[in-house]
Amino acid sequence: MNLILLFPSDYIPGTNRVRLTGRRQRHVLEVQKAKVGQKLIIGIENGLIGDGIVVKSDDSCIEMEASFSFNPPPKLPVTLAVALMRPIVLKRVLQTVASMGVPEIMIFHSKQVEKSFWQSSALLEDAVREQLILGLEQAKDTVLPKVSFHKRFKPFVEDVLPRILGQGKAKGVVADPSGEPVSTLKTQDTRHRTQEKVSRLYPSLPKGACRPEGEGIAGLHPPLNGEGMGGGNACVLCPVSCVLVVGPEGGFIPYEIEKFREAGCHIVSMGERILRVETAVTALLAKLF
């Protein structure tokens, strides 16, 4: 835990103090071994990062004076669309992509996905949120990614994906061994153009700065809407420039690859080696950005 992520419910009413119990309290006491007067790195959910000065520390709780002064790190200009995987793998992927700065994750069904996976408790809102928070704490970030679920492949590839790509802001990239080498893509050029546009729109902000929409501390999660899961506000400084699609552990079938082509996606390959989902996602994000 490189940042203690705080929530509005942590505040002591009428003060700028926060009270920690449970997992975060144990971490502060047992790992950081914080004492009264010590300064810790904190962040408010979907908002700014700052310092927390410990004013009380005992077996019941930790209390800190909280102040916030700077923005969380910028998000990657990418939406990750990944076929549902085994629950234990899903937990690792959610943590990893939250740490790497992916602002939106779409989880969809595919032929090679076991239907029973959709009944897993790992897909419950609280379970998903827990993994995202762990990822943010690792990376010193505060803005929760948006997560949505798409249980039917055809509506996803024919309706949802083209709608995103059709806005003209995104390039669809599907990872599959049958594709062209990933090095042929020019996503970095797209990202540079995006940053230049940001500089024109927000000249007063430092280079690379990023903050959620709105002033000061961002608001709470919006309510669940359909199958989507409320996340932080979309980062206004990092428009999506790539939709990265990663298949299940058994790979895509030819029909699915053809549907992605029809949607306007580019099929790319990392080489002949077949990688685990969590490895492929990390490698592709590192390669593209």
Image (cartoon, rainbow, N blue to C red):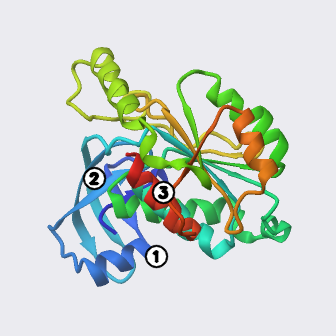
**Residue at position x 33%, y 22% in the image:** 198
Q: Nearer the viewer, residue 57 or 172?
A: 172
Q: Secondary structure at mark 2?
A: strand
Q: Which residue is mark 3?
A: 97
Q: Is residue 95 left or right of residue 237?
A: right
Q: Nearer the viewer, residue 45 or 71?
A: 71
Q: Secondary structure at mark 3?
A: helix
**Residue at position x 62%, y 76% in the image:** 88
Q: Is residue 171 left or right of residue 116?
A: left
Residue 248, x across and y down, in percent = 69, 63
Q: Amino acid at mark 1?
A: Gly
The quarter holding residue 23 reads bottom left
- Residue 53: numbered disc: none
**Residue at position x 62%, y 44% in the image:** 230
C-beta proximity under 8 Å, tags 1 and 2: no
Viewer can see residue 142: no
Q: Amino acid at mark 2?
A: Ala
- Residue farthest toward the top in the current orientation of the protein: 200
- Residue 22: numbered disc: 1
Q: Secondary structure at mark 1?
A: helix
Between discs 1 and 2, the one toward the N terminus: 1
Between discs 2 and 3, the one toward the N terminus: 2
Residue 182, x across and y down, in percent = 47, 48
